[in-house]
Image: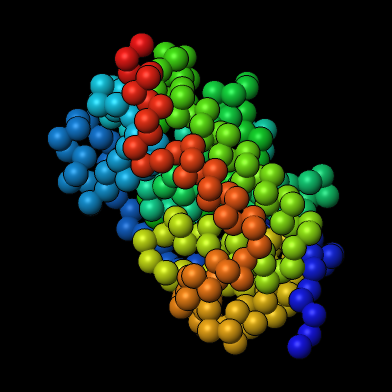
Amino acid sequence: MAQEMKVCDNGAPTLRRVARAIENAKGAGGNPRKPLARVASVGRIAGLYGHNPKQNRLLAALPTEDYERITGVLELVPMPLGMLVSEAGMELEHVYFLTSSIVSQLYEARDGSATETAVIGHEGVVGVTTVMGDGRSLNCALVKSAGYGFRMPAKILNDEFNRCGAMQLLLLRYTHALLAQVSQTAVCNRHHSVVQQLCRWLLLSLDRLPTNEMSMTQELIGNLLGVRRESVADAAGKLQDEGLIHYSRGHISVLDRAGLEARACECYAGVKGEYDRLLPVTCPALATVVMR
């Protein structure tokens, strides 16, 4: 059997190549419907095409008083495949609490090469740096799986953060988990095989999807991982031969999740463990904040 390929591929993808790969993937993934509605009251939320802010893990963890205070400024927005949510250095006007979409956080170097450093889904928010610094984005953020989210003016999130209550605690915990993912991704990209990277990438995506299926071309996966398409094809072929996935024309079905987890390196378990530890579905630490 051929030795698994390491990440020494020099086909560094540029942000333009990533965007082009996303365009090519649209045929397989499609875009969601595009209703755009502002949440006027808590009572109307459930009727927004089945969407609810509490489908986002951070918003769901807020105490009732905090949650009801912000519902009037949340806006349901479609997030189609390839949507550019933010660019590096851009001053953020809105933050996005994702519900069914997945956003890829990309670092773009001076030479234009870009690599995925983290994925964000229903567990988090795009734009958390608005409360951590001068309100500018550190990275480019692109939608890699179409869906929806609820956006909020960045100023409102800053106001909530400065209340020093539940929202502040949640955002700090989430930032900790996000940094853990970025750090683990850097280690994985440097030291582990493309097969292991692909397993980690698939599992992190599955954690943010309602099914065990996804639409993603080899070109797009390669661009996000920072490796050649041929390397992804080789890795996907190995996983398919082992009966872990089925891959055909940009459509991936995970057949054996337990087997995929066993095939992955320790990076996936490390990242998932941090998110589960810091952002459980019911966050006990919030009780302390509410009682202050």
Residue at 67%, 67% (x, y): give it: 196
Specify the quadrant of the image occupied by residue 285.
top left
Quadrant holding the N terminus: bottom right
Query: How is the model colour-coded?
Result: rainbow
Q: Looking at the image, which residue is at 49% across and 40% down? A: 277
User: Would you place residue 218 above or below residue 188 in this image?
Assistant: below
Picture quadrant of residue 25: bottom right
Name the spot of residue 227 as percent of width and height, x first.
Answer: 74, 66
View extreme (left): residue = 43
Q: Position of residue 102 (x, y in %)?
A: 48, 53
Q: Nearer the viewer, residue 123 or 85?
A: 123
Relative depth, front residue between 122 and 138: 122
Q: Residue at x 79, y 65 (%)?
A: 7
- Relative to 5, say whether 143 is above or below: above
Image coords of residue 65 (percent x, y)? 26, 21
**Quadrant the C terminus occupies:** top left
Residue found at x 74% / y 57%: 189
Q: In the rendered picture of this protein, how many numbered marks are placed on residues? A: 0
Report if residue 5 is visible in the image.
yes
Q: In the rendered image, is residue 36 in sight?
A: no
Q: Observer-nearest residue: 29 or 126?
A: 126
